Amino acid sequence: MKPIRVGLLGFGTVGRGTYEILRRNQEEIQRRAGRGIEIVKIAVRDAARARTVVGAGIEVTDSPEQLVGSAGIDIVVELIGGCDPARALVLEAIGNHKHVVTANKALLAVHGNEIFAAAHRVGVMVAFEGAVAGGIPIIKALREGLTANRIEWIAGIINGTSNFILSQMRATGASFESVLEQAQALGYAEADPRFDIDGVDAAHKLTILCSIAFGVPIRFEAAYMEGIGKLAAADIRYAEQLGYRIKLLGITKRTSHGVELRVHPTLVPMQRLLASVEGPMNAVLVKGDAVGTTLYYGPGAGAEPTASAVVADLVDVTRTHTADPDNRVPHLAFQPDALVNLPWLGIEDTVTSYYFRMRVADRPGVLADIARILADHRISIDAMFQREPSEGENQTDIILLTHEALERDVNAALGRIETLPTVLAPVIRIRQEELL
Ligand code: NDP
Ligand code: HSE
């Protein structure tokens, strides 16, 4: 049988990784897919540069529009990133009855409903394993392996760059800026690294996971995002003293009131496997009602780990493109007409435990005032310690861990605590999850 013909939009970190894997492992891939998978055309901005790398027989163009319209292409792989021009190109490819593979989580989190609807209308596949957690086959696990389960929650380290930054800063004491530069040089970071640091990239991925887990439409606007930019070394240290490590987690839960969708730094108990996930590695915990808790771990970013997922999608499409579209695995795990709208919970409706750090005057009665206000707002203290003030110092840090509380109550309590004359700075608050 003739090879299936692939057009590659973008030849950067992941595009080159995809090219390299297809070249190196072509024989085994063909044995698995049942036919060859061949890149026939590549579109980039700087065609001359790409031409110096690719072998003869692959056409390189600077016109992505020409590639998606090309009659000689069966599958378009979109690895440009961002929404513009990626959205228009993907829709055009679908309109031309081409299957699409993409690792572009920003595109799917923002325009996924439109793209999947267009693909469904014409009966083509849009595969996106590389869009979430790099090389970890989490989409396949959720959509297929766990399909018997009612998924209760997902919690994951799903941004390699921010995990790399947190790990390196803790292990080597290196500055935020220098570690970010390393992450960029290694190809982990987004074109705009604020997406990584501010939690936006993790929220894009979490939005996709949420939809697949609960059978709801993709709704990026519902995501709460807080990144790692404001984390202080003191909090990382105090958390360790209390037996926790701080990780940027994406958490989505189905509660009796609705769906939570949130990304923020989180205290994770040191004994959980998630706490030991370091560097650019990702890990996703999924709680299903039948299977219990399962954990998926692996490289979350980088050329070949991500390309591994892209090529797996190419093999999937190659195997199934002749199947009746109605008998394929649905894009979002649930049949398109069976997606349901559930209420979305804002961060104020979230119930979780908290870490507070309070800079206070070192004098009698301070703690009693704070404890009374917390009690007034139904917040119960689980643990606390006070840093020993240095000789002659008249202020100190109080560190508190709470039991579960409603974020709205926490906001009200902290608002009052911050008006106390003995509380000298805004209270630092980090959410905490037991992940059981
Ligand atoms: P890069 O920035 O390394 O590469 C982007 C490529 O797209 C370049 O070859 C660039 O061309 C090309 N390109 C950009 N704009 C256009 C355009 N308008 N027309 C034609 N070509 C264009 O990105 P990555 O490979 O890192 O990322 C690609 C996608 O994969 C993104 O969606 C990203 O979020 C996602 N992803 C990345 C991961 C990673 O670890 N890097 C991991 C998981 C997903 P030129 O070279 O000529 O400038
Ligand atoms: N910038 C992303 C990350 C790439 O660091 O996780 C992988 O999606």
Image (cartoon, rainbow, N blue to C red):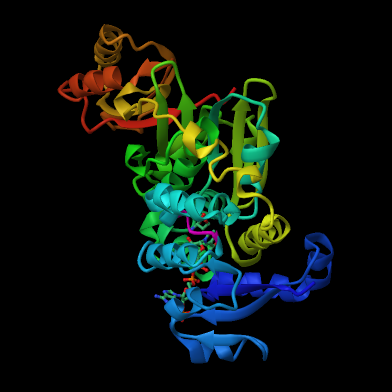
| Residue 337 shown left or right of residue 329 in the figure | left
Q: Quadrant of residue 308?
A: bottom right
Q: Which residues are magenta?
A: 101-105
Nearer to us in this view, 269 or 258: 258
The number of discs equals 0
Quarter of the figure that contains the C terminus: top right
Q: Residue at x 64, y 29 (%)?
A: 271
Residue at 55% in and 65% down: 98
Q: Residue at the spot x=50%, y=39% of the render?
A: 336
Q: Is residue 359 shown to the viewer in this render?
A: yes
Q: Is residue 422 above or below residue 317?
A: above
x then y, percent, for residue 204: 43, 48
- Seen in the image, is 391 located left or right of residue 125? left
Quadrant assignment, res 414: top left
> In screen coordinates, is 295 left or right of 263?
right
Residue 19 percent across, percent down from the top left: 65, 75
Q: Is residue 417 left or right of residue 358?
A: left
The residue under the point 52% across, 89% down is 49
Q: Is residue 118 above or below residue 350?
A: below
Q: Nearer the viewer, residue 241 or 291?
A: 291
- Image x and y of residue 315, in percent: 71, 60
Residue 267 part of the magenta-drawn span: no
- Please say whether residue 127 is visible from this viewpoint: no
Give how far across and how far down residue 132 sits, in percent: 55, 50
The N terminus lies in which quarter of the figure? bottom right
Residue in front for this viewpoint, 257 or 314: 314
